[in-house]
Amino acid sequence: MAELDAGRVSVPGHPLRPAPRWLIAALAAYVALAVVYSAVTPIFEPPDEVYHFPLIDHIAQTGRLPVQDADNIGPWEQEGSQPPLYYLLSTPLVLPLDRSDLDARLERNPHARIGIGAATDNHVSVLHDWDAEAFPWRGTVLAVHVVRLFSIALGAGTVAAIYAVARLALPGRPALHALAVLLAAFNPMFLFITASVNNDNLVNLLSAVTLALLLHIWRSGLSTRRVVALAVLLALASLAKLSGLALYPVAAVAVLGVLVRERRPWQAWARILLIVIAAWVLIAGWWYARNLHLYGDLFGLDRMVEIIGPRAQTPTWAELAGEFEGLRRSTWGVFGTLNLSAPDALFWYGDVLSAIALSGLVIAAVRARGQSQRVDWRALGLLALHALIVFAALVSWTRRTPATQGRLLFPALGGLATLFALGLAGWLPRRWERLAPLAAAPLVAAAVVLPFAVIRPAYVPPPTVAGLPADSAPVEARFGPIELLGVRVADGPVAPGEALDVTLYWRPTDHTVEDMSLYVQVFGHALPDKPDTLEEIGKVDSYPGGGLLRTTTWALDRIYADRYLIPIARDIETPVQPALKIGWRRFGSGQDMAPETLSGEPLDAVMVHAGRVAGAGARLSSGEPVGAVFTGLMRLNAARVAPVRARPGETLAVDLEWEALAPVIEDFAVLVHLVDLAAPEQPLAQGDDEPLGGRWPTSSWIAGHTFIDPHAVALPADLPPGEYALAVGFYRPADFTRLPVETERATLPGAVILPQTVIVEGS
């Protein structure tokens, strides 16, 4: 291949330069921070790590790749369909380590809330034995962390390669090289993935290195050594992950551009093509041939989709656009198994950064026209082309099975970070370009804070306490060896669609034979068509500690403060004091554990009434104003009575609009009496009840909140015709003492006379 060598074509040399000190510092900071991400994240909690590592273990044990069978799925599940290079490189790392406890570490959490960015509990996808996973690591835990360190090394290489991409794409602009490195290295999602067992890390590295080599070829020309290196890198990338195939069309465009520019003969074209094909056949072709032999599919995608589960139907483009939010978030910071989200501020920052960068690219293009040192937009076009191909492949894959994850764009991170750096600097005068790296300062700060503020707290088991807090409600119930001593519900009112803050105080006296699940059902008002049945407005099922504790291993004779944020349904009747039904059951069979008192008396159920769920408030749209205030705390604003002309035996509907003027500390009953004003001391009929049938006691009322309280007054069948009045008031249920009332209307002792007069006609 003499025509490819520098002997025939003059190719400028590019000797290796010492890495700038800031790059060494950035790499050191990246590695240190990635180790922190790894340390604070329990094993098998990053995306698909629970599948990637068993595949490595299988290869280490058998020396063979698995054969994928949708009817007999191994613990590696769909990852057994992935190109194997990452797993083959990881296998020697785990061979000398004891992994006999792998099955125990892989035991799944049946209540895991996977893929829910707003999950407040059950972030763990597996059940953890915290003693077995404690440092110093041993067994499977040690093996996982060793492979994670390998991934971190790959990530460091990726960051270094991204520096090379930026330097080659934007020569002579060191501030932009630094900005590109910072945008990539300190993206919290990139850090999180590179600190996990995931084959993304190898394809990310190979993609960045290949892009750097392509830019070097674009600038410096072709040589045999470069072509061979390119062919090997392309083949390795295609054996690391299918997204590595996106490099081939970019390489074709770059190499063809150089061949045309250098006016190479067609023989040179053919030799380059032969080298690329030969490298692919020798390095990666065996795996694709294996797929074709085993599955009749060169890429093995059909079997992978069969295992993952295909979409019920191909989504429309509008439906795919609706999934953009998940892509947006998982590009910057959704941790755990896509169920632990960074604060919204990070995503807003990402949005602003993206908008500024995209518009800045336009500005940079316009500005470059008038500068003697122009940007090589064709070289940048290669980076953009690669990013577009990776994105198109992601969209195509997402149309087959749900996979809208931003991390799948990271093979193009080198190009994206470089383009972003140029776009962000496009807004700055050239003399201020040295300030461009400051744009990444919020990202770096977020990357440092998030492991401690978001990730680590999600995996800390609930605390133990010496005794019940004063604001908790004592319960004293027992489920086998598990005692429920009390319940605390946060006092602040909760709106529909928000979460009820509930803490359960458990004291285990012995371990259970199997792991047991607790449940809390939250009930509101009675169902309209079933007055004896309360509507379920919220629920949580969980192993204790939000999945972080196991009843087979938790510490005994300690009081755990087990907290849950229980989402409340949006379309419910309010206001209401929730009723909480608390119990334990075997998850597999659903068999409940029978509750009893601490002294051994059986209980039908453990019910706790606490908390407040209130909507926007309601007012009577018709009726008459009343304006009666009881003890300065509660006001009857208005009342509506229907019908006002009735016959004996009929029922009056009396709707009362109440409003609390200040917090009420007692629970009072509502007095609703039909009286003859000539002899008002003896009620002729009554509709006394607690507010809203006991579902909104006065101690739950919220100052300034209004609601409508319906009462029914059944007229006696022998009630004489005549004119009657309705008296409304409050009394203490314990001794029937009435509360004083202040009003301009007529009153009876402890009651106000409603403005409506009821006419009872003869039967």
Image (spheres, rainbow, N blue to C red):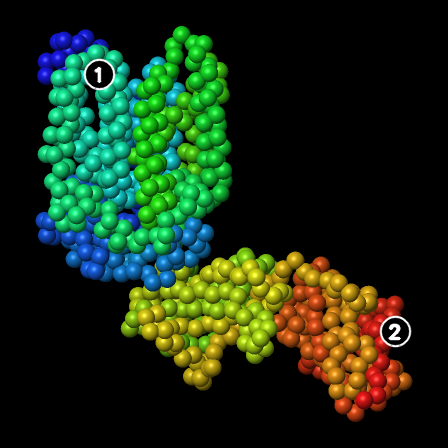
| Identity of the residue drawn at 45% across and 27% down | 358
Q: Position of residue 601 (x, y in %)?
A: 45, 85
Q: Amino acid at mark 1?
A: Leu
Q: Which residue is mark 2?
A: 746
Q: Secondary structure at mark 1?
A: helix
| Identity of the residue drawn at 25% across and 58% down | 106
| Left or right: 240 in relation to 679 | left
| Left or right: 335 in relation to 743 | left
Residue 666 shows in the view: no
Q: Position of residue 112 (x, y in %)?
A: 36, 58
Image quadrant in which you'd find residue 620: bottom right
Q: Quadrant of the N terminus?
A: top left
Seen in the picture, residue 475 relative to 408 is either above or below; the reply is below
Could you say which disc has been placed on residue 259 in the image? Answer: 1
In depth, the one of 753 and 644 nearer the eye is 644
Crowding near the residue tagged with mark 2, few <14, some 14–19, many ≥20 C-alpha atoms within 10 Å: few
| Left or right: 55 in relation to 408 | left
In depth, the one of 470 and 676 nearer the eye is 676
Q: Amino acid at mark 2?
A: Ala
Image quadrant in which you'd find residue 220: top left
Q: Quadrant of the C terminus?
A: bottom right
Q: Position of residue 749 (x, y in %)?
A: 83, 78
Crowding near the residue tagged with mark 1, few <14, some 14–19, many ≥20 C-alpha atoms within 10 Å: some
| Left or right: 91 in relation to 749 | left
Image quadrant in which you'd find residue 396: top left
